[in-house]
Amino acid sequence: MRRIHLTAAICIAACSMSLVACGGSEAPETTAATEAATEAAAEETSAEEETAEAAEESTAEETSEAAAEGTAELRIGQAYGAAHGNKCFTVATAVIDGDDTIVAAYIDEFQFFDEGQTGVPNSGSFIEKGYVAEGRVLGSKRANNAYYSENMAKAGATMELAANFDGLQAFAAGKTISELEELAGKPAEEVVDAVSSATLADTAGYIGVIVDAAKAAEETPAVSYDGDLADLSLNMAVTVTHGEDSFALAAVYGDGNEIVLSYLDEFQFFDADQTGVPNSEAFAEAGDISADYVLGSKRVNDAFYSANMAKAGATMNIAANYDGIQAYVDGKTVAELEELLGGSDEEVIDAVSSATLTAMPGYISAVLEAAK
């Protein structure tokens, strides 16, 4: 029988959210997408790749070691970094137990592609508003795995990028934060050799971002889970919760039916003096983003974003709202959340008393997308 409960209480406040978007600017000249992707792929390919069979064997072995049955105190965290060059930024999510052991990890990266590839939600709006150059889209490498991996193959790679990310995640599961941190600090070649389930030359960088996510998890509330961790997996949805100015990342650790842990963040373009994602300056220099703006996490820019919310009467910061939504959905089943969304928007807002965002149905839908 699974039992989930929060170890920290969430305060309740009432507010409404609003943020006025900045004006656009002339789109700068773009670069050739295929050339950029090929160059990035060449940098990703390790000179000493393991075979796919060895990768699969290592992944299965490490996943088995990570699975444990019994009551566990679990926490979730997320971090952003520049694991590979200056053309993209990395997102890592990690779930840890009470012994600071990583029980699950998830990696994705976001890079600018030509407009023919799959962009994040609201990509068209970002171009129209002058944030992103005409003909360019910011896209998830997992969503564009076939395209990106094809360019990697031209540089000699034998494993697709998504399979490499999966191998890194499997390697991290079962390791303590200190073990991974020690490994990430070693010479790049030594780290590549140690992680036989992946073949990326920048393996050390990816391991480092997972470590950062695990450390962030140490600061979040815990839930108690009574069950077999082997039944659970960590997944992420890149989606939209409301409006045309942002896109969201929703992470869920669960079994496809029950949500054990969740994590929400959103990304929006801010004035250039706010905190952007890693490699923001490089994106502007390449002409992908207008120099007047940066793409930033709303959690990272919580004070700035929440100040704009307060001007519209809000009394609760955006990060606190995210935490409140997470507190509500953790322990719920997919069926329960689907039933909730079957009601009116007002009923959904009233039900989630630990948060006060008027776009509540969008956030619940984002969690559901990741849970499935």
Image (cartoon, rainbow, N blue to C red):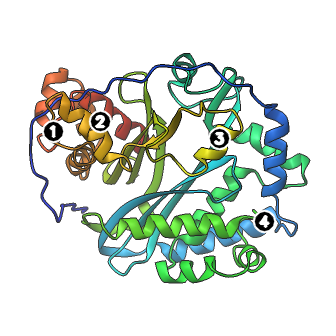
- The secondary structure type at the circle numbered 2 is helix
Q: Between disc 4 and disc 1, whose residue precedes?
A: 4
Give the alpha-carbon distance from disc 2 to disc 1, as whole Å. Answer: 10 Å
Q: Quick check: marks 3 and 1 in contact, CB under 8 Å? A: no
Q: Quick check: marks 2 and 1 in contact, CB under 8 Å? A: yes
Residue beneath label 1, please? 352
Residue beneath label 4, please? 53
Residue beneath label 3, please? 283
Amino acid under disc 3: Phe
Q: Quick check: marks 2 and 3 in contact, CB under 8 Å? A: no
Q: State which mark lies toward you, 3 or 4.
A: 3
Residue 196: x percent and y percent? Answer: 73, 72
* Residue drawn at x 75%, y 80% as measured from the top left: 190
Rendered image: mark on residue 364: 2
Residue 107: x percent and y percent? Answer: 56, 55
Q: State which mark lies toward you, 3 or 1.
A: 3
Above or below, 310 against 2 in this view is above
Give the alpha-carbon distance from disc 3 to disc 4, as whole Å. Answer: 37 Å
Q: Nearer the viewer, residue 85 or 178?
A: 85
Residue 137 relative to residue 329: left or right: right
Q: Residues within 10 Å of mark 1 (few under 14, many from 20)?
A: many
Residue 258: x percent and y percent? Answer: 31, 50
- The secondary structure type at the circle numbered 1 is loop
- The secondary structure type at the circle numbered 4 is helix
Above or below, 43 against 193 in this view is above
